[in-house]
Amino acid sequence: MSTSTIAPAVRISPWAPLRIRLFRAFWFASIASNLGTWIHEVGAGWLMTHLAPEPQMVAAVRTAMSLPIVFLAFPAGALADRIDRRRLLLVTQISLLLIATTLSMLTAADLISAWGLLALTFLIGLGMVLHIPTWQASVPELVPRNQLSRAVALGSISFNLARAVGPAVGGLLIASLGVWIAFAMNAASFAGVIVVLLLWQRRGTESSRGQSFALSVRHGIRYIMRKVRMRNVLASVFLFVLPASVMWSLLPLVVSQQLGWDAGGFGMLYGLIGAGAVAAAGVLPRIDHRLGRDKTVAVAMTGFAVGLWCLSQVRSVTTVVPVMLLLGSCWMMTLTSLNTTAQITLPQRMRARGMGSYLTMLALSMTLGSILWGFVAEQTDVAFALRTAAVLMIVTTAAGLRFRLD
């Protein structure tokens, strides 16, 4: 990307999209929705420890939420490119509200079973897989093109703010009122999004409505395979997330084994990751302007590798704080850069399918990475797995230089 293309954008404030009334409303609603999602995850995991405390069943809660993304994100994107996105978002949010309300009421009445919890959580995952690519494909309709990278960064901020606060809020609510309140809060968060969607007067846009669903899926796959920059984005996502997933997979073991902390310390590390991501959002436009997107991603991936190596050595709060801030900032910078590149590259008629493929690659890489690093840590130890992932990240960073994004 030429300097002339980027130079005018760098003078735009990172917070400029929030001056747009509709985007601002969506942004605050997304914070509430993300907060509700994290509170739900805490509540569902805690409830399962009482309903069926076997490790496989507890782990199945997260699987039930994430599995639909791996298999259905691209078809969901094809659907979002065929029908009115505002209407699809409304139907999705209303359905999610009803499911979360049902789960809350069954839990409050002590009528929920372990398999019932998994089934309702899976339905919430289905709703989210329809919502996420549709919402991400809608962002370019809310802001001018030269503010898109800022809007994507703000979306990352809303997610990381919720991730930093949500688990702690969920724990406090559950301790004081019971686990049912976690699901009730999630239901309330969907209500906020519904109100904002009702205020959105969406203009008619180009779609694939005239095609059959199967043809729409095939055209989407063909377009992504032929579009070099989009292929490069997907390759870069895989090269980053496969080694980076070690942080999310083994962080509980870092807390318990290396640091000897309890659940409160685990929440603190999540908060530090979120704080690092929020801080990086303010400086990412300048870094992107100075280095270009390819070098920005390479620098962020290298920084993440350094952070992983340091994480394998931490034994105290004074050393872990800067490491987690570094990891959070590099995670945000890499994925925000890749997400922005995808959204700018994709035409309106293909945007939801393209973002569906992005989410599929993200979830697939995270799943494969979690399996890989869990196996490595089990055969060796946590520190060795972190160092191995750091070395692999350096290798994938070098390999990623051939997949140009500028």
Image: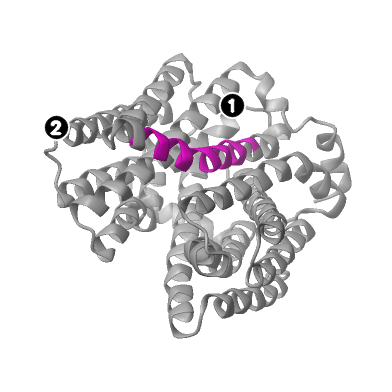
- Expressed as whole percent of the image width and height from the top left, the position of residue 232 reads 62, 62
Looking at this rendering, what residue extends furthest in the bottom direction?
A: 379
In the image, 105 versus 342, the foreground residue is: 105
Q: Is residue 25 above or below residue 319?
A: above
Q: Which residues are magenta?
A: 154-174
Name the residue: 60% across, 41% down.
Answer: 156
Give the mark nearer the N terminus: 1 vs 2: 2
- Expressed as whole percent of the image width and height from the top left, the position of residue 316 reads 65, 62
- Expressed as whole percent of the image width and height from the top left, the position of residue 5 reads 83, 42
Quarter occupied by residue 397: bottom right
Q: Is residue 82 above or below residue 233?
A: above
Mark 1 or 2, which is nearer the eye? 2
Quarter occupied by residue 295: bottom right
Q: How many marks?
A: 2
Name the residue: 65% across, 56% down.
Answer: 324
Q: Quadrant of the C terminus?
A: bottom right
In this picture, residue 57 sits left or right of residue 312: left
- What crowding class fits label 2: few (fewer than 14 Cα within 10 Å), some (14-19), or many (20 or more)? few
Q: Mark on residue 157?
A: none
Camera sees residue 205:
no
- Label 2 belongs to which residue? 109
Q: Quick check: marks 1 and 2 in contact, CB under 8 Å?
A: no
In this picture, residue 243 sits left or right of residue 113: right
- Label 1 belongs to which residue? 142
- Expressed as whole percent of the image width and height from the top left, the position of residue 191 reads 37, 22
**Which residue type carries mark 1?**
Leu
